[in-house]
Image (cartoon, grey):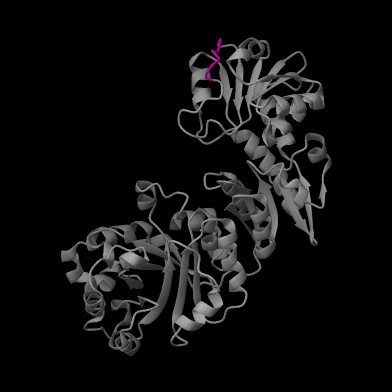
Amino acid sequence: MVPKICLVLTENTIDKNIQLIERYRPWIDIVELRADFLDPQELLYIRAFPKIAHIPAILTIRRFLDGGTFKGGEGSRITLFARGLAFADTNPLNNFAYLDLESDVQAPSLEEAAQAFNIGIIRSLHSIKAPIKDIAAKIRDIRRTDEEIVKIAYKADNLTEATAVFKEAQQLNGQNILIAMGKYGIPSRILAAKLHSPIVYTMPREYIAKYHLEQEYIDPITLSDLYHFRTIHENTAIYGVIGTDTTRSLSPAIHNKGFERKGINAVYIPISAANTQEAITFADCTGVAGLSVTHPFKFDIIPFLDSIGPASTACGAVNTVLFDGGKRRGFNTDIDGFSRALQEFLNIRSLGFKHIAIIGTGGAAHAIANAVHLLHGKACIFGRSAEKSKQLAGRYNFHWAVLDSASVRMLKKYSDVIIQATSVGMHEGEDPLEFYSFSGTEKVFDVIYTPEKTALLKRAEATGCDICNGYDMLRYQAYKQFELFTGGSYE
């Protein structure tokens, strides 16, 4: 069963909500009218909503204590529900398809009326402050009839709490909607079919952008077009990218496009985690087949692996993990990806006689240093930690310096190509080389690809420098990952 894609409607008028339906109609199967967001005068017209919406609809009036906006008395809320059911039509399409009633609501007459007109009940339990423990027991307590759908939704403050949803789903019976909310819970929406949830909830792009909720929610277009949601089922292979914040990663777009083009039954998802342990636990629980590894886990992942490939051994970092026959194998495709991107940017095959500045000492910097060494470049490692800079430089007999204004002379000496290999610059105004003045002759490569031009690249470009962001590196290393994941070529 493919879960229905539900668009949550939170506009303050019926008309505005209808406009949203029309905008998203090609991507949705059902809508949830959040009547608690409607202006008071609009509540008079909720009964007419299903008929003018021309799509199955859930009527929800969420209480403030459950994360909604309704602050009136329970009696008035039940009256509003009754208004939504009043004068039920013999044509079921003109009635609400479901009522969402919280687990503690006692409204027998309302439920009897719903049953009489074949209107389903979603019995919901929301927790916006803490995870819900022992979900299976909660569902048994909540469900009043076999026909009811039980909805469990809670805010997950880490990936471990989100993983619990997948663990619990394995022992559940009946129709249940399971949602881990927040950025750690995004996989529970994309993989709703794996949880056997009959409905997945999405928000309009306009709402997500207005309230800066890109880390929290997913819209129906992204769910359908990027993740090919309707093709995901029990046997779909799962791949993903792990990091502390993967919500802005472009890797899902690259890999899912490849899966679609090659006709491979797989999906690639973002997996945000606070640490490597919980990422591995999630992967083991959900049967993940392969992972891309990004900041800051490229070193931390190694102790969890059974083996690592030659490239990872050479540079000391892993950016790819295969789960194969109970074994976890680590690889590094950053070296190949960076080498190809840099050679295209500079239009050269070798870095011989070039003096290269590598900014950073993290996982990306380790791969880049190895690539520069293989391309015969002379380099200096600049890092905030003298110890880490010296250690990385020592691998390849490079020079090193602490990254601060005292190292400007050394930076100028190694300024033929400046490679920025840290995460500094992902946010507005961040510039790891703010103390350095470009001459206009430097070639500047920044591994960051979102934003397209960091503050560093903008400043370099303004002085006449040739610049390149990290998208081509991302793309080329992803192509190599795709080969490891599938055994076939991406291109």
| Quarter the N terminus occupies | bottom right
Q: Nearer the viewer, residue 470 or 364?
A: 364
Residue 482 is situated, as x and y percent measured from the top left of the image, at 70, 48
Residue 242 part of the magenta-drawn span: no
Left or right, 359 with reference to 147: right
* 43 is higher (above) or lower (below) than 471: below
Q: Nearer the viewer, residue 77 or 294?
A: 77
Left or right, 257 with reference to 219: right
Residue 377 position by quadrant = top right
Name the chief secondary structure element in magenta: loop
Q: Residue at x 75, y 22 (%)?
A: 349
Q: Residue at x 64, y 41 (%)?
A: 296
Decide if residue 489 is in sight here: no
Q: Residue at x 22, y 60 (%)?
A: 13
Left or right, 364 with reference to 42: right
Residues shaded magenta: 434-439
